[in-house]
Image (spheres, rainbow, N blue to C red):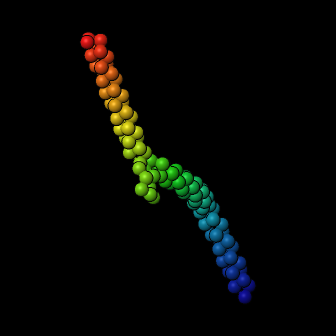
Amino acid sequence: MITHIVFELDWMDMETKSRALIVETLQPTIHKVHSQQDEISTVQRTIQHMSAQIKELEYTVFKRGGQRLSVFEEIDDRITKIEKARAESEASILWEIEAFKNVNSS
């Protein structure tokens, strides 16, 4: 019976030491996993923030979700209107110059 108790104590001691050895061996891995989980959370938050910024930029540039013109189309329309107004002004000025020349030459 004493041998049996000693054997159980030796077995429990060996089990405790084995567990301590396993914990000691796995501790750096466990620490690294926790660290990586924190990094993954940070990266996920960054991705969410950047996705929101991209959607906002996309809406600003392309104005999706409606029949609105994109920023580039609006700029092109403005350039076209300004060019048309410039051409009309130029034609008007040239007409006035010709009229003035005709009045002075007559």
Q: Is residue 20 left or right of residue 80?
A: right
Answer yes or no: is residue 50 visible.
no
The answer to whether residue 99 is above or below residue 22 is: above
Kindly identify the residue that appears in the image at 60 percent across and 66 percent down.
22
Q: In terms of image quadrants, where is residue 64?
A: bottom left
x%, y% of residue 42?
58, 54
Whether residue 82 sits left or right of residue 17 in the image: it is left
- Residue 62 lies, in percent from the top left, at 43, 50
Q: Quadrant of residue 81?
A: top left
Left or right placement of residue 51 versus residue 27 in this view: left
The answer to which of 89 and 24 lies nearer the viewer is 89
Where is residue 28? Give x, y as percent.
60, 58
Q: Residue at x 41, y 50 (%)?
A: 69
Q: Residue furthest bottom?
A: 1
The foreground one among 101 and 70 is: 101
Residue most extreme to the front: 106
Quadrant that contains the C terminus: top left
Quick one: which residue is furthest to the top in this view?
A: 105
* Pick the front one: 22 or 36: 36
Viewer-side residue, 84 vs 60: 84
Residue 42 shows in the view:
yes
Number of marks: 0
Q: Position of residue 12 (x, y in %)?
A: 68, 76
Which residue does the image show at 26% across and 11% down from the upper left? Answer: 105
Q: Quadrant of residue 90?
A: top left
**Quadrant placement of the N terminus:** bottom right
Query: Residue at position x 37%, y 33% from top?
Result: 85
